[in-house]
């Protein structure tokens, strides 16, 4: 018969157990942080404070709310805006130099949807996934499949029919017809 000599184990100090659990917790936190770095930028952005995501996937944040209860543009309107468009890396691809008129239906789908969310005087930041922008087509300085970021300030908007009438009157005045369109208020009748 052999005799096994038992060596008694010393009890583990409580402070070692605390260090062990703190180390495990820090490892889990680091793992979650690394996993989030691989997230889609829009998914990460959607979790940011103040960012709203629409049914289409358009994301926006209100920078300045504009007039409370004010009307918002529709598909039949032309919006007057100041804007700056950037890629996710911060490169500016377009910026208005002065207030720019834009038909609500004459822009990419995400920009159209964005304009219809804004009351007069509002300033919003929008993030558009590629399908709401230019999709898989490269357009000028915008690479294919680009997520777009726009800062937009809505100054005013008018019905497209009013804008067209104003343009027609301006063209008539440029052609030398005094007073604009016949029958228009302030029009000077032309003698035959």
Image (tube, rainbow, N blue to C red):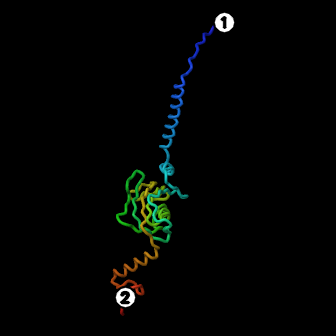
| Relative vertical location of residue 57 with respect to residue 36 in this rendering, above or below | below
Q: Position of residue 96 (x, y in %)?
A: 37, 63
Pick the front one: 89 or 3: 3
- Residue ID at (38%, 67%): 99
Earlier in the chain: of badge 2 and badge 1, it is 1
Mark 1 lies on residue: 1
Q: From this viewpoint, which residue is outermost toward the top?
A: 1
x then y, percent, for residue 188 = 37, 88
Quarter of the image with the C terminus is bottom left
Work out whether 20 lies above or below 68. above
Q: Residue furthest right?
A: 1
What whole-number distance in Å separates the C-alpha atoms at marks 2 and 1?
129 Å
Check disc 1: other Cα within 10 Å, few if <14, some if 14-19, many if 20+.
few
Apparent side of residue 169 relative to residue 5 in the rendered image (left or right): left
Which residue is the site of mark 2? 188
Nearest the viewer among 108 and 51 is 51
**Residue at left 49%, top 59%?**
132
In the current view of this chain or complex, which residue is farthest to the bottom? 192
Q: For the point 53% across and 32% down, which residue is it?
A: 24
Split into 4 quadrants, where in the image is the N terminus? Answer: top right
Q: Position of residue 190 (x, y in %)?
A: 36, 90
């Amino acid at each position: 018969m052999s005799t096994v000599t038992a060596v008694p184990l010393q009890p583990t100090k409580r402070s070692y157990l605390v260090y062990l659990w703190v180390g495990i917790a820090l490892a889990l936190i680091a793992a979650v942080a690394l996993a989030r770095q691989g997230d889609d930028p829009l998914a990460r952005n959607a979790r940011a404070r103040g960012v709203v995501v629409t049914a289409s996937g358009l994301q926006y944040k209100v920078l300045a709310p504009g007039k409370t209860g004010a009307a918002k543009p529709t598909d039949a309107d032309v919006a007057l805006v100041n804007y700056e468009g950037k890629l996710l890396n911060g490169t500016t691809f377009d910026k208005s130099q002065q207030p720019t008129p834009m038909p609500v239906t004459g822009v990419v789908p995400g920009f159209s949807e964005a304009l219809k969310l804004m009351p007069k005087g509002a300033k919003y930041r929008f993030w558009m996934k590629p399908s709401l922008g230019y999709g898989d087509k490269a357009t000028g300085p915008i690479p294919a499949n680009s997520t777009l970021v726009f800062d937009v300030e809505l100054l005013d908007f008018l019905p497209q029919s009013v804008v067209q009438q104003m343009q027609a009157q301006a063209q008539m005045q440029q052609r030398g017809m005094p007073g604009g369109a016949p029958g228009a208020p302030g029009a000077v009748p032309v003698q035959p």
